[in-house]
Image (cartoon, rainbow, N blue to C red):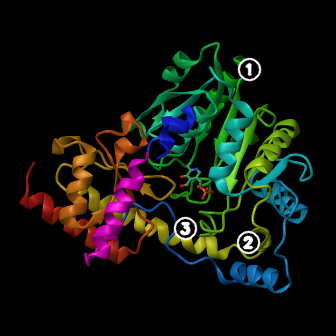
Amino acid sequence: MVDVNKHLSERSRRLRQSAFADFFAEAVEMERSGEDIIHLHVGEPDLPTPPHIVEAASKAMDEGYTHYTPPGGILELREAISEKLRRENKIDVDPRREVAVLSGGYNALFCAFQALVDPGDEVIVPEPCLPQYWGDISMAGGTPVPIRLIEDEDFRPDLDDLKRKITSRTKLILINSPQNPTGSILKLKDMKEIADLAETNNLLVLSDEVYEKFIYDGSEHISFASIEGMEDRTLTINSLSKTYAMTGWRVGYVAGESDLIDKIRMISEHAVWCPNSIAQKAAVAALKGPQDCVRRMVDEFKERRDLITLGLNQISGFKCNTPRGAFYAFPNIKRIGLSSTDLAQMILRKAKVAIIPGVAFGESGEGNLRFSFANSKENIMEAMERIKRVLDSSPA
Ligand SMILES: Cc1ncc(COP(=O)(O)O)c(C=O)c1O
């Protein structure tokens, strides 16, 4: 018998199964045994991909568009992305040199960290955050350095903490607005202060904007690269996953300075060669086609946001900020007196509602739970009722 563990790389040994996967596996198992589970842990729109996008993919297949494409994506798609960035994000990029298409935002993040981070480098990451950031940074040999998000101020980043954490090893500041898991959005004033810090300390900024369309209450998304002086210092990461309910299609992209984009494209060649050809054609249709499907989805999500915030604040021991963006609510549950893992487990097992414990997004997420409101209003209301019933009958 070969003990394969002895052959594993140090890199892969350090990898841990995410708490997401644990909760997902348990919820699926319960469902398989006949339980009626409400899924509020899912990070993707529950609506179908709009039909005109699906049709473009069908057409591509019918026409035999089923082969390799150039690494970094077809020019037609890179042009559609650069037009979109100019029109909506005030970012001016050359589609030939300053945009690359990758297999989703996750692939874009992975390749970006591979291109930028050396062993010993530090990357500043507002936390709680998407756990993939830490794994990607660590796999590149770097160290993620968390900075605090201030819950009482709508989870805005603690910029004094950020200043304190900048060292001679800092390479990059990561920002994510709208943010997963807190639903916060960065204010222009804070962005400008981060821009000043990046400039003074000669740092790059990686701006993850995959939730850009999910903004409520009349605010507007501001792309970090559109801030004066930040165009060349910012690597923008975006994806079609959330905007067009296209998570399974795996189309994401990076935009930024041409030498960096070139390296990211080369790294992606080693991982996947090119993004899926059919999905690229669908992505062109998504970006160039009618956008009312996006507006309708966001209007619907705003109603769900209002419903879940109200419902969560009616549960004794829960205190929930109103999320300004994305599709997550991140209530504080410290008054209940259980860890986020124990409470999430209890809610899954007794109320049959699947959610994610805050600690899965970093230690600073302990004391909160993440609820996704990418589910129907009926299911959200039913989930709130179930949780209330369980917590009222089993006080901690
Ligand atoms: C903050 C954030 N960035 C990036 C991604 C990656 O999304 P995708 O790979 O589907 O584009 C996600 C997915 O949940 C996310 O929450």
Q: Which residues are magenta?
A: 17-39
Q: Earlier in the sequence, mark 1 or mark 2?
A: 1
Looking at the image, do the residues carrying marks 1 and 3 touch, with CB atoms under 8 Å apart?
A: no
Residue denoted by label 3: 298
The residue labelled by disc 1 is 202
List the residue tagged with mark 2. 286
- SS class of the residue under badge 1? loop
Residue 322: percent from left, percent from top = 39, 52
Q: Is residue 227 visible?
A: no
Residue drawn 32% across and 65% down? 27
Q: Amino acid at mark 3?
A: Val
Residue 138 to residue 28: above or below: above
Residue 332 vertical position relative to residue 172 in the rendered view, above or below: below
Residue at figure coordinates x 38%, y 63% from the top left: 306
Give the residue at x 73% y 50%. Answer: 271
Q: CA distance from mark 1 to mark 3?
A: 37 Å
